[in-house]
Image (spheres, rainbow, N blue to C red):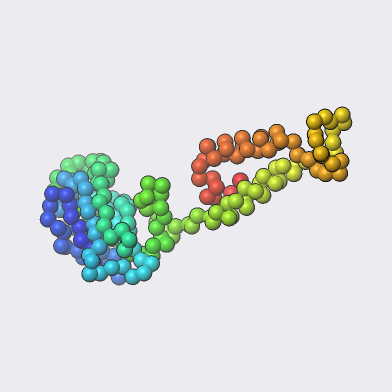
Amino acid sequence: MFGAICAGRLVQTNLQQVAENQFVFQLDFAESLNHIVVFLLPTAPFAPGMGAKVYFQWPGKPFQFLGYLTNDKPSAIFRLKNTIQSLSDNAPCIGVTAVLGISVEPTTNFIETPAGEAAATSAVAKPLPPTTSIAQRILRNLYNFLASFAISHLPPNSVGLGDLRPNDTYIPLKVFQDWHTKFLAKINNNPNFLDSDDQI
């Protein structure tokens, strides 16, 4: 079902199935690895809605998430430099056998980052709120903010107000400008705050 190639080596053929949906490759002399290619064999595509998360593990260390494969992305090259740094705590590191782990899971367990790679997660990914939900929260916040500054009468001796009617409710433009400035500051301080369930 899967194949792996360590840069500068022959294709790995030692795939072992360790559970119904989990597979491992043993990688000898792993301390010399820089990159590894993992691919889905063309004779064994995933079932619809399924994919595979790819992990790397040094002896005595937890699995580290590398990325994922799907039918639309049946191969990937992973850089192992950062994983080697975590091994350097334990010296010496010569002749080390590492493990490449593959877990077949529903693609709903994968989330995309801006760089286009899946973010590591040990649980089912929380879906992003729909655009309409975000827009409704922003508008509700804007309405509540503006309503708290609404005035139902014209200031005495008002000039330059054009066709404003005496019985209407008014909101000074500066109030909206203040809300807009505060809203942009929130986005700059925390670009992901719209994705949370917190109030805006």
160, above or below 109, in the image:
above
Where residue 167 appears, x then y in whole percent? 86, 44
176, above or below 75, in the image:
above
11, above or below 189, in the image:
below
Residue at screen point 70% across, 42% down = 145
Q: Is residue 65 rendered to the left or right of residue 32?
A: right
The answer to whether any part of residue 97 appears in the image is no
Residue occupying the far front of the picture: 163
Where residue 30 appears, x then y in whole percent? 18, 49
Frontmost residue, 35 versus 65: 35
Residue at screen point 65% across, 48% down = 139
Where residue 25 appears, x then y in whole percent? 21, 59
Where residue 175 appears, x then y in whole percent? 70, 36
Frontmost residue, 21 versus 61: 21
Quarter that holds the N terminus: bottom left
Residue at screen point 21% across, 51% down = 36
Quadrant of the image occupied by residue 54: bottom left
Q: Is residue 183 rendered to the left or right of residue 44?
A: right
Residue at screen point 33% across, 70% down = 47
The answer to whether any part of residue 180 appears in the image is yes
Q: Is residue 109 rendered to the left or right of residue 173?
A: left
Frontmost residue, 80 versus 111: 111
Total number of numbered labels?
A: 0
